Structures are given as structure tokens and as C-alpha cells.
Amino acid sequence: MNILAFETSSQVLSVAVKKENGPVSEIHIQGFMKHAENLLPSINTLLKRKKLNIAQIDTCLIGAGPGSFTGLRIGFATLKSLQLVRSRLCYGAVSTDIIAENADLPDHTVLEVCLDARRQKIYHRTYLRTNGHWVATATLRVLDADEWLGQIPAGAYLAGDACIQYGDRIKKELKTKKIHFLPESFWYPRASSMIRWVPNKGLVKSPDVRLKPLKTAADFQPLYFRLSEAEEKRALAVSP
């Protein structure tokens, strides 16, 4: 089984390819404004590296969000285009789950994955390390920044791009809670993390529960979790 995975929800474009019975090759490119420009060339580079063509890809994995509205649309538009060329198995994953997968910490560690949703909002999900795996302790939520800061548990580890804007404030206001920040390289979802959830042998009949099958047209839509800025302004304009 040959697998293509890509993640376009953050400012770091991540693309990975795994050839059957071979190692994973991956490319990361920084910069929100370049995802549309770099996604297909990155896929092509990795396919050439693996001596594959796109028709030989059996399964596609995509980071479904939340994250950048534009980035997610680029990712799903590309996936839909690939499906027009050849129908294949497709799976989507929540971006916070992908970020958590890359953090190798001891059992009983609490991990807060926090993504900047803009306009003083945070995409947030809490995980507990259990038997070497991350288990989400709650559904993903969108919170006001102040509300989220008040809920961060003592001793937690933080990952996600919300650390850029709120890191200094956390260090100052939550000093007594002894919050730990993972290195910045762990703040963004990696395409290779999704590939690790796929069974090593056979077809993906029962993928990891964090991989959701994409079957209907409705499935091939990003997970936004909130309205866009334009939609929010329109809602306010028409509200009584």
C-alpha cells in the first residue's frame, strides 16, 4: 500500500509519502502564503524520490482542521482533484490529534494543544498520555483566550501556534502553575504522524480511530469549528 499524506492547516506545509514496505519521506515548507504554490511540487518531489507516480498511490490522508481557512481549502481542493484522476481510499484527521501524536512524553503527562483561531479565540484540546498513547480527555473546543488561559492545568505541556501570541502572557500570569512549552518544531501538524496510524500490513479496513473515512461529498470538507471573519461580521450585521 502506497500512502500520500499532507497537512495544510498551519503555516508549515507538511507532505509525506510512504511506499509499501518502505520508510516515510517528508517535506516541510514554512509560510502560509505559499501552500498553493508548493503543495503539488512537494508531492511530485516525494513521488519521484520513491520512484512512484500519482496513479500508484492507494491511500490519501489529509489534515482536516481546524486551522487556516485558506490553507484547508487548498488541501481539500488538491485532494478532490487527485480523486478525479483516480478514486482511492481517503481519510481525514483532526489537526490537534496530529500535533499530539508527534509529542513523545512520559505516561500521565497532560498535553494542551492550542491553535490560534484569531480574534482572541483558541482552538483547544487536552490529552493525557496513557500506555504510550495520547488520549483526548474532551472534545475540541473554541474558547475565548481569557477563558482558555484560566483552564490550563498545572504542570501541563503546551504545543500549538497559539504559543506564539500567548506564550509570554502564560509565562507571566501562570508562573505558579509551572507550564512547560514543547519546542516550536512540535507546534505544527506533521503529515508523517497520520501515516503512523495506518496498519503496516493489508488494506486500511480498520484504520486508527483518529482517521475518519472520507466517502461522501460532505466528508470532503474542512473542519472549521467556527465561522470565518466575514461570516461572523455578516451574522452581526443581520442580527436584530
Image: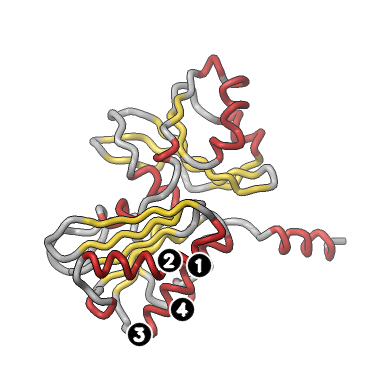
Q: 165 or 113: which is nearer to us?
A: 165
Residue that appears at 47% across and 51% down: 30
Among the two numbered marks 1 and 3 on one chain, the one whose residue lies closer to the N terminus: 1
Q: CA distance from mark 2 to mark 3?
A: 17 Å
Q: Amino acid at mark 2?
A: Leu
Whether pointer 1 and pointer 2 mark residues with C-beta atoms closer than 8 Å, the reply is yes
Neighbour class for label 2 at 10 Å: few (<14), some, many (≥20)?
A: many
Q: Which callout, 2 or 4, points to the residue nearer the camera? A: 2
Asked which secondary structure carries label 3, the reply is helix
Q: Is residue 31 above or below residue 87?
A: above
Q: Secondary structure at mark 4?
A: helix
Q: Which residue is mark 4?
A: 217
Q: Amino acid type of disc 4? A: Ala
Q: CA distance from mark 1 to mark 3?
A: 19 Å
- Residue 155, given in percent of the width and then of the height, sits at 44, 22
| CB contact under 8 Å: marks 4 and 1 | no
Residue that label 2 marks: 39
For marks 1 and 2, give the CA distance: 6 Å
Residue drawn at 69 percent across, 47 percent down: 119
Residues 125 and 77: in front is 77
Task: Say which quadrant the N terminus sits in.
Answer: bottom left
Answer with mark 4 or mark 1, whichever residue precedes in sequence.
Answer: 1
Between the C-alphas of marks 4 and 1, the distance is 22 Å
User: Which secondary structure, mark 1?
Assistant: helix
Task: Give the residue furthest to the bottom.
Answer: 85
Residue at coordinates 60% horizontally, 31% vertically from top-left?
149
Q: Earlier in the sequence, mark 2 or mark 3?
A: 2
Which mark is drawn over residue 85? 3
- Residue topped by disc 1: 36
The C terminus: image quadrant:
bottom right
